[in-house]
Image (tube, rainbow, N blue to C red):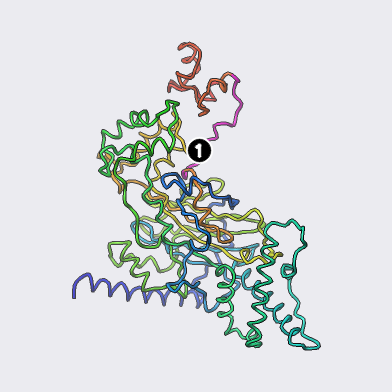
Amino acid sequence: MSHYSSTRIVLLAMLLCVRAMLFGSIASGQVDRQKYLGAQSLAEVEVQSLKSPQNEAYSNPSAPGMFLAEAEDPLSFYVRTQDGEWQIPAQVNRDDPWVRLLILSPVRPTIVDVAIEINQHSFRAAREQWIDQLLAEAKTAFLVREGEANPEVVETTESSDAIRPTKKNEEIPMVAAQSRMTRTLFKRLVNYLAADPSIVDHEASREELRWLLAEWTGGPALLTLSPALAWRRADAAPLWRAIDRDGDYTLSREEIEQTAATFKQADINRDDIVDLDELQRLGNDRAKHEQTQGHPLVVVLEENTDWKALKKHLNTAYELPVEAVNQLSLPADLVVRISFGNEAKVALLAVNDAADQSWRLHSSTEQVITVARQETYVELSAAQGKDVDPENTRGDMQQTQVAIGAVVDGFPLFRLLDQDNNRQLTSRERRSASGILTNLDRNHNGQVDRSEIPTAIRLAVTHGPKVHEHLAQAISAQRKHRNQVDSPVPDWFIGMDRNHDGDLSKREFQGSPEQFAQYDRDEDGLISRKEAQ
């Protein structure tokens, strides 16, 4: 038997042992993740409001933001079984908010425990309560249809109002369409009960009901983004390709020294602004970097996990040793809490710092928490729609869903420079390029190769099947920057700032060289807004 074959056998055996340990420990109460919910968070950020995808993010794979082909059915972006069906758990603990994720990040896999809540309750409770409400009213309607004189009327929540038709001119976003869908679903449930009226009272039939409702409506309570989308932007490197003149996947000392000249060459319209289109035109004829992987970036670890497929993914993602599988054991590397509804927030609850090369809290902005390990950093975020209905008074199926996804966001050089996230580089932003490239040179050999480039992983959860749209949006780098427009400036400064980049170059300044030098107190060749005050 070859060494490779024996290694595969050992790896599979370890996976099976870990599977038993993982779920056995949780079931027996040995793993008390609830303790984190009462602990003080390490960082908290806001849950973002979902926005409509920008056309450029869908059409330009070199732009910041994930490239997505438009699809008539957004659910096509989410994982199903090989038979095209939704994967439904056999049993559901409606009080359990926890989801365990395995991120196949560089070097070794990472375990993330995420507690997901909707209006301060487990996200699973929202779906189970919705099913309870539908079944209760369907059972009542079935009894009436069968002609029972005094059918048992089961009290339901306010969400039963959603089953009744809305008024013709009632202007409630998405309610009319949802009500029509709910009425159709309602009739199908009544017909389903006609085949076996006792099914509503049998817990053993609950899994079948969950499966039917998922197929009839729009998927299960938990959706996972398709692996194909995870790597769609992994090759996006417009700035790297522009600087890497010889296309050898390495930035030599000479190429780094010529960065300023490269930017000048890219600035076709000579407005002292270099945007993505200009960089792409410059780098089109140079080598493209092929980093696309064939394995999922994130896997949900649960009773339905395909452990045979996971073993294959681990073989693909890592050059074995089998020690990588040890990362499936407890405790988690990261513990996160995501709350949707009225008190929406993302909280980093714990970071396991016991292991070598462990994750650490890097930074947090208003809407993103960043954790880092060596040259890999994960940006945690969440989003929900503006019309969120945490009590689900409309009976909306999407209000009972959450979606999880992760993407590799390409070579993040452009994002590191683009401090204000406007998809263009000003003179001041470009000046930081040499310093950033120098810092990336970990072995201090005067050049930067692909192994030294940071890997940016965006991990997100959305309320409703919208994580593909959320991750398609461009975001700035993980660092928090000073707001450059927080103070008023003279009118003459605004009038001279032709490219509106917040600085005056010598070409833009209409005074004498002596006057320019008087304002340029730090002698960096630019007059900043602060210097003009």
Q: Nearer the viewer, residue 119 or 197?
A: 197
Residue at 25% across, 43% down: 248
Q: Which residue was labeled with disc 1?
A: 422
- Kindly report the secondary structure that dominates the magenta region of the rendered protein: loop
In the rendered image, the vertical position of residue 333 relative to residue 209, given as above or below: above
Asked whether 479 falls inside the magenta stretch, the response is: yes
Q: Nearer the viewer, residue 246 or 318?
A: 246
SS category of the residue bearing label 1: loop
Q: Nearer the viewer, residue 214 or 406?
A: 214
- The part of the chain drawn in magenta is 477-491
The amino acid type, in three-letter code, at marker 1 is: Asn
Q: Quarter-wise, where is residue 95 in the image? A: bottom right
Residue at 60% across, 51% down: 49
Viewed as shown, does residue 308 lie left or right of 120? left
Q: Quarter-wise, where is residue 487 in the image? A: top right
Where does the image place residue 475, in percent across and percent down from the top left?
50, 45
In the rendered image, the vertical position of residue 151 relative to residue 177, given as above or below: below
| Quarter of the figure with the C terminus | top right
Viewed as shown, does residue 417 lie left or right of 117? left
Residue at 40% across, 29% down: 268
